Image (cartoon, grey):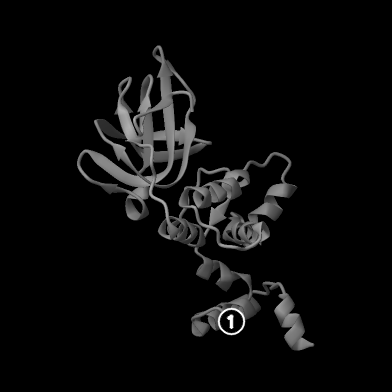
C-alpha cells in the first residue's frame, strides 16, 4: 500500500491517513489500551494526497496487531454500499502506526479459524477474496493444517449463505445472479448452519433435542431437506 512505509521494524504513513476500526470489533477483536488498540488487522484505510481524499482500501493483515492511537472519533462510513459504524484513527504524515513484526504461531491460525467457524469475520470482505485472506493468515502464522485447499474452500462455502435462504450456499446464489457482488452474503456460526441444513446433519452434530425440534418444524412447514452421502449409505 503506497501510503505506508517501513522503517526500523515499524510501519509509518507518508501522508495524512485515516484507519477505520469497525465498532463491531469491540465484542470479539478490539481491546483498547490507552495509546493503542489491539485489534484484528482486517481494517480499512484511506490516505489523503495533498489534501485530496483517496479511496477506502482494505488493510489486509488477517492477524491481531497493535495500532497506535493519537486522535480518534466515532463516525459512520460507507463501505461497499454498507453503513459501518467505526472508530476513525487519524495520523499526520510520518506517524508511527504499528510494528512491522506480527505475532506468529498456532494461536494466530486457531483464532482465525474460530472467527470463520463462528461467522465473525467482517461482512465487508469480498467473498471471492476470503480464501486468499485465509491463506495469508496461515502464511503469517507459519502454520500448515495439512489438509487440501478444497477443505478450506468447502468450509467457507458452507459458512457463507444466501441471505434470502440460509439453506443455500452463497456461492450457488452468487453464481446465478446477473448483477451480484461478493458482499451480499449472510453468515452464521457452524452450529446454527448445521442445524438448518437437515435433521440428520443436526443429529450427528450436537444438542439432539434442538435438532429434532428443527426437523419436526421443517416437516410441518414442508421444507425439503438435502440428503447427505452418509445418509444414503445408511439407508442402503
Describe residue 55's horizontal placement relative to residue 92 as left or right.
right
Q: Quadrant of residue 225?
A: bottom right
Q: Position of residue 29 (x, y in %)?
A: 36, 51
Observer-nearest of 9 and 132: 9
Return the residue found at the far left.
34
Can residue 220 be seen by looking at this rendering? no
Above-or-below relation of 195 to 14: below
> How many numbered marks appear?
1
Task: Count neighbours of disc 1 (C-alpha within 10 A) and say few if under 14, some if 14 to 19, many if 20 or more.
Answer: few
Q: Residue at x 72, y 45 (%)?
A: 177
Q: Position of residue 37 (x, y in %)?
A: 29, 43
Return the residue at label 1: 204
Q: Position of residue 86 (x, y in %)?
A: 36, 39
Above-or-below relation of 43 to 47: below
Can residue 117 be seen by looking at this rendering? yes
Observer-nearest of 117 and 223: 117
Q: Residue at x 50, y 50 (%)?
A: 137
Above-or-below relation of 163 to 13: below
Q: Position of residue 122 (x, y in %)?
A: 47, 48
Amino acid at each position: 500500500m503506497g501510503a505506508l512505509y517501513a522503517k526500523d521494524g515499524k510501519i509509518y504513513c507518508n501522508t495524512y491517513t485515516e484507519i477505520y476500526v469497525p465498532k463491531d470489533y469491540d465484542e470479539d477483536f478490539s481491546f483498547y489500551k490507552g495509546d493503542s488498540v489491539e485489534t484484528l488487522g482486517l481494517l480499512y484505510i484511506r490516505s489523503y494526497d495533498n489534501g485530496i481524499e483517496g479511496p477506502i482500501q482494505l488493510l489486509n493483515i488477517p492477524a491481531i496487531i497493535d495500532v497506535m492511537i493519537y486522535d480518534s472519533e466515532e463516525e459512520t462510513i460507507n463501505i461497499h454500499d454498507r453503513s459501518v459504524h467505526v472508530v476513525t484513527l487519524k495520523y499526520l504524515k510520518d506517524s508511527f502506526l504499528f510494528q512491522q513484526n506480527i505475532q506468529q504461531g498456532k494461536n494466530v491460525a486457531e483464532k482465525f479459524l474460530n472467527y470463520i467457524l463462528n461467522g465473525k469475520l467482517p461482512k465487508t470482505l469480498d467473498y471471492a477474496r476470503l480464501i486468499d485472506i485465509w491463506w495469508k493468515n496461515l502464511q503469517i502464522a507459519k502454520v500448515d493444517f495439512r489438509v487440501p485447499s478444497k477443505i478450506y474452500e468447502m468450509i467457507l462455502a458452507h459458512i457463507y449463505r444466501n441471505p434470502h435462504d440460509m439453506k443455500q450456499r452463497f456461492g450457488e446464489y452468487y453464481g446465478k445472479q446477473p448483477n451480484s457482488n461478493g458482499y451480499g452474503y449472510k453468515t452464521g456460526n457452524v452450529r446454527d448452519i448445521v442445524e438448518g441444513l437437515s435433521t440428520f446433519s443436526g443429529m450427528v452434530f450436537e444438542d439432539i433435542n434442538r435438532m429434532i425440534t428443527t426437523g419436526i418444524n421443517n416437516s410441518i412447514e414442508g421444507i425439503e431437506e438435502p440428503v447427505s452421502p452418509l445418509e444414503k449409505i445408511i439407508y442402503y
